[in-house]
Amino acid sequence: MSKYFENIISFIRSIYNVEKDFIPLHEPRFRGNEKKYLNDCIDSTFVSSVGKYVDLFEKNIAEYTKAKYAVAAVNGTAALHIALLLAGVETDDEVITQPLTFVATTNAISYTGAKPVFIDVEKSTLGMSPVALEEWLKQNTIIKEGKTINKKTSRRIAAIVPMHTFGHPCRIDEIVEIADKYGIPVVEDAAESLGSRYKGKHTGTFGKLGILSFNGNKIITTGGGGMIVTDDEKLAKLAKHITTTAKKPHPYEYYHDMTGYNYRLTNLAAALGVAQMEQLDNFLESKRKLAEEYKSFFSNFDDVEFFTEPENSISNYWLNVLIFKDKKARDEFLEYSNANTIMTRPAWVLMNKLPMYKDCETGSLGNAEWLADRIVNIPSSVI
Ligand SMILES: *Cc1c(COP(=O)(O)O)cnc(C)c1O
């Protein structure tokens, strides 16, 4: 065990002012109007899928992200599932994404009946590489009747789903530019990046559609929840319709004009969301301060690097990232920190290594593999 592990652990303990107890990776903070708004829901009896907080939460997110429309959903995975359907993804299509992501991204692609294709990430952003994307499209696809077709599988490439990893924006403008050239819609998985901007524009608002998550571990939480954001009015209306059982409005008749989903967010959850949104700027400020402290602390270490926001980006620093010099050091640190009741985690096992996705098409994944061996997330809760 390296001596410097001990220094890291005592630094994290000093930051959180916790001498011996467990320090989680990311726990929520409820310091605002959460209880007041929840009580208001209960008093009003509007706890379920209708109520003012759902509308208000959608309005808050639209205003904050400057997306024209925001449609709430039961969780981020469901939001992504619907966003992909609205982008036109169908059974037996292919959808390009990155292998370094949470399984929800890939599962949502699967729910549509499409097959994921994995394209490498960049070491500088941890997100999809525009260079690798363009290279793969150039070598592996042809454009036939306006559709981009994978030459090997004859399947249509129906969408591209980049993800802003741990809150750090990827080079989304270049990805959208390439996608436009090939006529492929971009659906942004911004589940982790509420509050993160690229060239001044909020993540999730570059593509045709984007999604956010409000799971318990995200920067704000509704217990469980998600949001679809888009500038397209027709898609926004359809998103609301499909996520609410596709019922035609009528004073008493139950008529549904397509197979819809019960993917709506409850008023209770949205009440939490409205209270959390009131604190988002404070959360972001606290997380930025924490990242600054980590950055200055780790600048003294040769064998481990603290990952900082990429060029042209403002990151929400959702989960702070260390990059160790090799897998051995990384594994030793995971062992040591968790044994000392400080919660740390490696990056996700790459999607192409999971049994259900191991036979999917991939580009060369050198950077993703390099990063997956070296990344550790360290405690990142708002102080
Ligand atoms: C959290 C997350 C989601 C959505 O997760 P839910 O728990 O369904 O809200 C999707 N993609 C990524 C990358 C995530 O981190």
Image: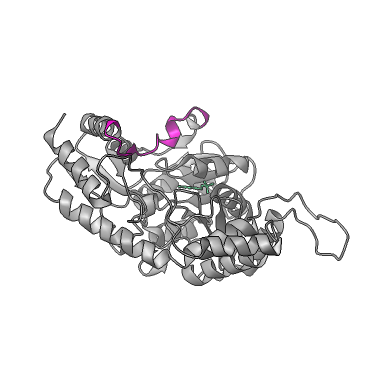
Report which quarter residue 257 is drawn in.
Answer: bottom right
> Residue 258: x, y in percent?
77, 52
Please state if 315 lies on the left or on the right of 29 as rendered: left
Report which quarter residue 37 is drawn in.
Answer: bottom right
> Residue 353: x, y in percent?
43, 30
> Residue 17: x, y in percent?
26, 50
Identify the residue at horizontal 40%, vertical 34% (top origin). Answer: 349
* Residue 349 forms part of the magenta stretch: yes
Classify 58 as above or below 6. Answer: below
User: Which range of residues does the magenta coloring cover?
Assistant: 339-356
Report which quarter residue 118 is drawn in.
Answer: top left
Q: Nearer the viewer, residue 280 or 230?
A: 280
Please state if 103 lies on the left or on the right of 59 as rendered: left
Q: Nearer the viewer, residue 211 or 24?
A: 24
Q: Is residue 333 visible?
A: yes
> Residue 323: x, y in percent?
24, 42
Q: Nearer the viewer, residue 249 or 17?
A: 17
Q: Nearer the viewer, residue 307 or 74?
A: 74
Please state if 323 lies on the left or on the right of 297 as rendered: right
Classify 356 as above or below 383. Answer: above
Q: Is residue 208 visible?
A: no
Identify the residue at horizontal 24%, vertical 31% (top origin). Answer: 336
Image quarter hosting the C terminus: bottom left
* Residue 162 forms part of the magenta stretch: no
In the rendered view, how is the structure colored? one colour
